[in-house]
């Protein structure tokens, strides 16, 4: 078990160092890449929200109804 904990700690440190380097890197190409990724996420998210808005509402209402039925509210 300790072996897995040590391996997890090393992996966490490695990933956190890489993320820290990515965030603090001020090269123009990398910043442009992050902006493109954010733009794509926003556009795709907006598309799915617009396309499946009715379905999302129905699913949310069913979840709330199930919670009410389960807890007797």
Image (tube, rainbow, N blue to C red):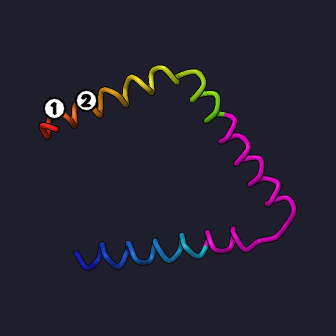
Q: Secondary structure at mark 2?
A: helix
Q: Secondary structure at mark 1?
A: helix
Q: Position of residue 66 (x, y in %)?
A: 22, 31
Residue that carries the numbered disc 2 in the rendered image: 65
The stretch of residues the image draws in magenta is 18-43
Task: Using the numbered discs, state the Cα–Cα distance from disc 1 to disc 2 in whole angstroms.
Answer: 6 Å
Q: Residue at x 61, y 69 (%)?
A: 19
Residue 13, given in percent of the width and then of the height, sits at 50, 77
The residue nearer to you, when weighing 52 against 67, is 67
Circles 1 and 2, Cβ within 8 Å, touching? The answer is: yes
Image point (60%, 25%), residue name: 50
Sort mark 1 into few (<14), some (14-19) or many (20+) by Cα contacts within 10 Å. few
For residue 37, which numbered disc appears in the image? Answer: none
**Snapshot quadrant of residue 27:** bottom right
Q: What residue is shown with label 1?
A: 69
Question: Residue 49's quadrant in the figure?
Answer: top right
What secondary structure predominates along the stretch shown in magenta? helix
Left/right of residue 1 with respect to residue 13 in the rendered view:
left
- 56 falls in the magenta region: no
Establish if 14 lies above or below 35. Answer: below
Pick the residue in front: 57 or 3.
57
Q: Residue furthest front?
A: 73
Q: Quadrant of residue 7?
A: bottom left
Q: Residue at x 72, y 74 (%)?
A: 24
The quarter of the image holding the N terminus is bottom left
């Amino acid at each position: 078990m300790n072996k897995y904990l040590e391996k997890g700690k090393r992996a966490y440190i490695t990933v956190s160092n890489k993320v820290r380097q990515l965030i603090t890197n001020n090269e123009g190409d990398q910043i442009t890449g992050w902006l493109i990724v954010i733009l794509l996420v926003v556009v795709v998210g907006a598309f799915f929200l617009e396309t499946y808005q009715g379905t999302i509402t129905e699913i949310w209402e069913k979840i709330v109804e199930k919670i009410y039925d389960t807890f007797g509210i």
